[in-house]
Image (cartoon, rainbow, N blue to C red):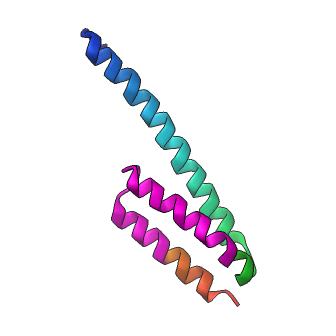
Amino acid sequence: MANHKATRKDVRQSEKRRERNRYYGKTTRNAIRALLELKTKAEAQSELSKVMSMIDKLAKRNVIHKNKASNLKSGITNRINALS
């Protein structure tokens, strides 16, 4: 365990950030999963912008890498465009 006061505070802050990042990441993964389960293109198109926004926010907060965000968005878009 940390001995300095500032280091203890840093540990507390990093734990908070980790929990927050895990929450945002898990929420986004669940939203992606729900989006990919939709059967009609119209429903999927309406939900797509919300999910894209969530992915962009994860990249902006450095929870995921910007290239991973780009790959996720590309893959989701291709899957939705393939729906009939």
Q: Is residue 45 left or right of residue 70?
A: right
Please say if 61 is above or below 2: below
Please say if 84 is above or below 42: below
- In terms of image quadrants, where is residue 7? top left
Q: Position of residue 57 (x, y in %)?
A: 47, 56
Please say if 40 is above or below 69: below
Magenta residues, start to end: 45-74
Picture quarter with the N terminus: top left
- In terms of image quadrants, where is residue 15? top left
Picture quarter with the C terminus: bottom right
Q: Is residue 5 left or right of residue 29?
A: left
Q: Position of residue 28 (x, y in %)?
A: 57, 55
Can you name the residue that lies furthest to the left here?
4
Q: Position of residue 67 (x, y in %)?
A: 34, 66
Task: Determine if the magenta segment contains residue 5.
Answer: no
Task: Determine if the magenta segment contains residue 47.
Answer: yes
